[in-house]
Image (tube, rainbow, N blue to C red):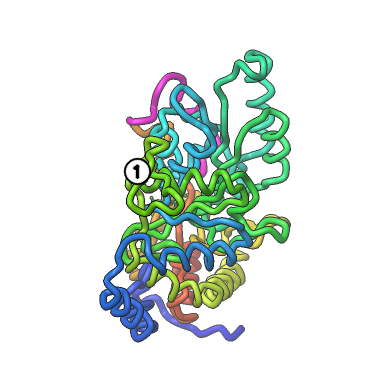
């Protein structure tokens, strides 16, 4: 790779994401797709939603797809379809923001946190094993209210699923994958989303596959879970075969539907997702190459994972100073996420105090997300890397 030299004084703005640039590149396709929906006059649960469910399901090697209103609602309805409800408890991680906890609470269950692996930032199977062993020594199986695990494939890196699935089988727990940051990521040659009981995706605008508004999808290979989510997303309605006028309400559902305009946009963008992921990986390789000799720690990719780099998260002992330095040089950075959920007021309940989850807490003080998106040029990446080098040399 050629090293282009840029001095820190050269003004290069490096935005964290650039959705207008993505739109400009796809304008004709996107505009055409939206106009066809407007002219067709069908806006809810129409042909684009059905086609996207099939196409995105196939993209992730999953038998069934059910489009819903957001990634959080995908988690909520997947948990409900897995039979998780009031009074149950669900394990998740403290470092992936409030989304999984919000969904767990929406079905009336209580979140239980288990700490993460410092290299992958995902659920640590050893800590999970330890937690479950202690728990089931105290609660005989069948009496426990522990029902499921929400595994988050954070930043685009798959969690170590095999030992997690093994534990889930041993203790009879359902596994819901949070794939909101991991469209197309793989674990040992399997696409994330179809590894556990259900996989939940977000199409929030800045995700690797993003709509122009909210959206989400549940993928599953379990026909009963798919049917249940399909019913729950539309008020709990079950259409009666051969009787279009009548419907039966078989469960207490919600209104959580992806609309036709978003589905049409997502179908256009899905065609480009592989190219965008390829570009994200190229950028990651370039960062890795330029930062490898420096003090900052670049993200690790486990041998079992094919990373899709939703985020490129480095670690620094001097994170705040580095962040200020980069902002002064036009580089937009973010922190995913600055406060672990057990220290957020809404979820800081009994026993969850500072020190409860030391790995998540330490990472929260060191992580920094550098810009990574398909529209980024090599020159912009060089500018970011150069600015980090200058910071360390100062
Ligand atoms: C974005 C995100 C969600 C939630 O998706 P929404 O569509 O915003 O509801 C869930 N989990 C993770 C890890 C996310 O990054």
Q: Which residue is drawn at 66% across and 15% down?
A: 140
Quarter of the image holding residue 277?
bottom right
Check the image and name the residue furthest to the front: 242
Q: Front-most of 251 and 219? A: 251
Task: Name above or below for residue 31 compared with residue 307.
Answer: below
Q: Which residue is drawn at 62% across and 53% down?
A: 194
Residue 80: x and y in percent read 47, 37
Q: Which residue is drawn at 32% across and 79% down?
A: 36
Q: Is residue 227 visible?
A: yes
Residue 247 in the magenta stretch? The answer is no
Q: Front-most of 283 and 168? A: 168
Q: Can residue 11 be seen in this view?
A: no
Q: Is residue 191 left or right of residue 283?
A: right
Residue annotated with mark 1: 235
Task: Name above or below for residue 296 compared with residue 363.
Answer: below
Task: Say what secondary structure mark 1 lies in.
Answer: loop
Q: Give the range drawn in magenta.
A: 346-363
Residue 35: x and y in percent read 29, 79
Task: Pick the quarter of the image with the N terminus.
Answer: bottom right
Task: Name above or below for residue 291 compared with residue 232.
Answer: below
Quarter of the image holding residue 11?
bottom left
Residue 156: x and y in percent read 55, 58
């Amino acid at each position: 790779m050629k090293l282009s030299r840029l001095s820190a004084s050269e003004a290069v703005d490096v935005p964290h994401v650039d959705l207008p640039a993505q739109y400009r590149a796809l304008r004709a396709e996107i505009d055409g797709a939206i106009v066809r929906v407007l002219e067709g006059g069908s806006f809810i649960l129409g042909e684009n939603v059905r086609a996207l469910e099939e196409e995105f399901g196939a993209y992730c090697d999953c038998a069934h797809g059910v489009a819903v209103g957001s990634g959080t609602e995908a988690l909520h309805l997947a948990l409900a379809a897995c039979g998780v409800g009031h009074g149950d408890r669900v394990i998740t991680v403290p470092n992936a923001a409030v989304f999984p906890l919000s969904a767990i609470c929406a079905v009336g269950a209580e979140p239980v946190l288990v700490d993460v692996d410092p290299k992958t930032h995902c659920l640590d199977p050893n800590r999970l094993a330890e937690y479950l062993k202690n728990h089931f020594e105290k609660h005989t199986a069948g009496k426990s209210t522990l029902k499921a695990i929400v595994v988050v494939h954070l930043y685009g890196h798959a969690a170590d699923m095999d030992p997690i699935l093994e534990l889930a089988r041993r203790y009879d727990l359902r596994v819901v994958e949070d794939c909101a940051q991991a469209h197309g990521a793989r674990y040992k040659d399997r696409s994330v989303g179809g590894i556990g009981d259900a996989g939940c995706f977000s199409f929030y605008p800045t995700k690797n596959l993003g709509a122009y508004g909210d959206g989400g999808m549940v993928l599953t290979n379990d026909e009963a879970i798919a049917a249940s989510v399909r019913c729950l997303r539309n008020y709990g309605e079950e259409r009666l075969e051969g009787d279009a006028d009548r419907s039966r309400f078989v469960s207490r559902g919600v209104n959580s539907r992806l609309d036709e305009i978003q589905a049409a946009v997502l179908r256009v963008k899905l065609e480009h997702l592989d190219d965008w992921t390829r570009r994200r990986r190229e950028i990651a390789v370039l960062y890795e190459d330029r930062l490898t000799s420096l003090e900052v720690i670049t993200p690790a990719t486990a041998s079992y994972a094919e990373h899709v780099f939703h985020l490129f998260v480095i670690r620094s002992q001097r994170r705040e100073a580095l962040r200020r330095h980069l902002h002064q040089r036009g580089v937009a950075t973010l922190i995913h996420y600055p406060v672990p959920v057990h220290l957020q007021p809404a979820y800081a309940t009994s026993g969850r105090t500072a020190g409860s989850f030391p790995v998540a807490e330490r990472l929260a003080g060191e992580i920094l997300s550098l810009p990574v998106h398909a529209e980024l040029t090599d020159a912009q990446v060089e500018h970011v890397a150069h600015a980090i080098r200058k910071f360390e040399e100062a």
